[in-house]
Amino acid sequence: MIPSVLPTYSRAPLTFVKGSGSWLIEADGRRFLDLGAGIAVNALGHAHPTLVAALTDQAQELWHVSNLYQIPQQQKLADMLVDLTFADTVFFTNSGTESCELAVKMARKYWFEKDAPERVEIITFDGSFHGRSSAGIAAAGSEKMTKGFGPLLPGFVHLPWCDHEALTAAINDKTAAILLEPVQGEGGIRPLPDQDLKALRDLCDEQGILLILDEVQCGVGRTGKLFAHEWAGIEPDIMMVAKGIGGGFPLGAVLATENAASGMTAGTHGSTYGGNPLGCAVGSAVLETVAKPEFLADVSRRAGTLRQSLEGLIAAHPDVFEEVRGSGLMLGLKCKASNIDVVNAGYDNEVITVPAADNVIRLLPALNITEDDIAEASKRLSAAAKQIEKTS
Ligand SMILES: Cc1ncc(COP(=O)(O)O)c(C=O)c1O
């Protein structure tokens, strides 16, 4: 008999009932060190007092009104994002894949309004992940995500990751945009080198096409800059955001320049919940904290400590781990043992990591993880590695 919850997830046998900072409490009382943060969502850890206050204060006032009316909390968050980034305008969604839907629509509408309706193709890359909506799976294009769900949304061209020649050759008079994650998350924590991102921006400028960045996983302070593309000193035309921006509340956004957003006039897009007062109150509280230069400097400092301890783990357990990669607190440990075995051994040792493609485990802790918790993470991951060494 089919379970009452549609069985699309393979879930670990863990039930967390409470969280605080970087710790999760299991129903049986065990305390787990959370290096996954709900897959890069709980940017400030669990039950951060500022976010709890923002949510509960707003909950006492007003939850939902609809985008038929003015929403001051939405206006405030949009103004902050515009002040802090390349963007001139923001649309709020509830998830990353909804941000992908709008990014694709926006790019196509841009060209339609520029009298080039044939420019519909969006170039994407192997290993990418943009969510599970029809546009999201067609954009990523992997068999795993698309098999059985045809006909797929047409107009996506898939290229190898980091292949500038293939990219240059693929651009033609049907190309609308290039879409990529500056640091691939699900694909195995694969950062695009800064010089490649710069070259991509130059290529888009030369060809007059739009650059769409998916910063759903790597954005909102995760790499030590507010958004990952800032490391390369470039700006996109359109950017997808979600996960960390809500700190655990379902919130996403599409940020765009005035030019890129020029086709999106009244009536062309909408969302019942996107930008509701609750989500935006929390989003503003997240951003007020994360965007502070001293907070971002701390992310880089903590990332340095964590990375160093992971290098130590590789040296101590060369049969289990082989490489650390990533940026800031978006780190991947490529495993020699099976990454799923490592994640499971982590559960046995009460530390949570997240598997990704390319036999990688992801470490995406709360951005405010303490130095003590980083030291504890290293101990627990080492215990997990020893457990694997014993059984192999
Ligand atoms: C880079 C990226 N884009 C899009 C998504 C989809 O986000 P959501 O699951 O909120 O729809 C994800 C989710 O993991 C992601 O990592």
Image: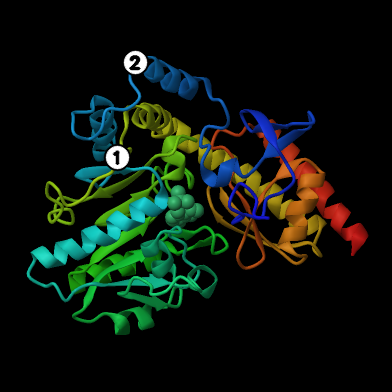
- 105 over 228 or under it: above or below: below
- 295 over 204 or under it: above or below: above
Measure the alpha-carbon separation of dots 1 and 2: 19 Å
- Quarter of the picture holding the C terminus: bottom right
Residue 341 shows in the view: yes
Q: Position of residue 384 (x, y in %)?
A: 81, 50
Q: Mark 2 or mark 1, which is nearer the start of the sequence?
A: 2
Q: Quadrant of residue 209?
A: bottom left
Q: Amino acid at mark 1?
A: Thr
Q: How is the image coloured?
A: rainbow
For residue 147, side relative to residue 340 (left or right)? left
Question: What residue occupies the far bottom of the structure in this picture?
Answer: 169
Q: Residue at x 21, y 65 (%)?
A: 108
Q: Residue at x 15, y 67 (%)?
A: 111
Q: Residue at x 13, y 72 (%)?
A: 117
Residue 235 shows in the view: no
Which residue has dot 2 on it?
A: 61
| Label 1 Cα neighbours within 10 Å, binned few <14 / some 14-19 / many ≥20 | few
Q: Amino acid at mark 2?
A: Glu
Q: Position of residue 351 (x, y in %)?
A: 73, 42
For residue 210, side relative to residue 230 (left or right)? left
Q: Give the structural element (helix, strand or loop) at label 2.
A: helix
Q: Position of residue 60 (x, y in %)?
A: 39, 14
Q: Residue at x 39, y 63 (%)?
A: 134
Q: Is mark 2 within 8 Å of ligand 1?
A: no
Q: Nearer the viewer, residue 21 or 231?
A: 21
Which residue has dot 1 on it?
A: 272
